[in-house]
Image: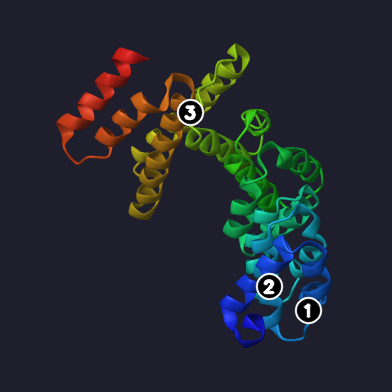
Amino acid sequence: DDIKSAKGEKKEDLIAGILKYAGIYGATTYGGTLLAWVDSPIPAERTSAARIIGLVAKKEFYHPLIKLLNDPDRRVKSEAIHSTSKVGNRHLIPLLINIAISGELFKAAVNALETFGDEVVPHLKKELKKAHHHLVLNRLLKIAGSISGKQSIQLLENYLSDPDFELRETAIYSLFRRNFVETNPEKIEQLKELIHLENKAFNYLSSSLGRKSTTPELRHSIVSEIRLQQTRVLKILALIYGKSLIQKAEDSLLMSDHQMNVNAIELLENNI
């Protein structure tokens, strides 16, 4: 009677409670209602179905989410993504990755993938081997950067020497966010080589600033690139020497006070 008179989220909560705790009775009494809502032409009912599945939070309830994760309605799909993180069935990982690499609801999909941990990594490796667009490959590495566990770290480490600048930068930034410090001597040499490459680029850019032919517009672009380069170099250094030390230096370098800038350089010179 309570369910019949209830509306909205209260009704969803009651149905979820019966499905979760009432065993066969719950499944036979309200399982049909749930499946009818999954197939409903009304988006609000499909959204309710997705939410109820998340409230039940049982791995065996994952089948309806396959359809709901492919729903054309954004709200339905968003609720299904959220419920997927609660259900926790690994069969849904490829669907979440497809949503993430499409760019639609990227953050929501990545948040759901985070709950699976290293289980996601084999799927990411499989996708990275495909001839995806550059933008998609970059998104896959960003997903890896959000996944906890040793496997995701190893995956990102493999891209530190990638010839593609943007993929390499994403790997560096992702490892930096994870407070990762490299201990493998071979990988450390790769990171040092990246700093040498940045140094060559800096020498070229700085020499361009002194040319008479350099227009004010070009000068502005060069200075902007050098500032970006400074940030990149500091993140690479953090992967070798630790984030705490480099963060102190970076904070001082970003200040307009010249003496603080000098102190930052001295800090780096004394510790590196």
Front-most of 159 and 7?
7
Which residue is labeled 2 in the image? 15
**Left or right of 223, for residue 236:** right
Asked if the residues shown at circle 2 and circle 1 are in contact, with their CB atoms under 8 angstroms apart, the answer is: yes
Percent x, y of residue 68: 75, 69
The amino acid at mark 2 is Ile
> For mark 3, does the 10 Å Cα neighbourhood hold few (<14), some (14 to 19), or many (20 or more) residues?
many
Which residue is labeled 3 in the image? 236
> For mark 2, does the 10 Å Cα neighbourhood hold few (<14), some (14 to 19), or many (20 or more) residues?
many
| Marks 3 and 2, the one that precedes in the sequence | 2
Relative to 130, is 57 above or below?
below
Mark 3 or 1, which is nearer the eye?
1
Q: Is residue 103 visible?
A: no
Front-most of 208 and 142?
142
The amino acid at mark 3 is Ile
Percent x, y of residue 55: 64, 63
Quadrant in which residue 146 is drawn = top right
Which residue is labeled 1 in the image? 33
Quadrant in which residue 167 is drawn = top right
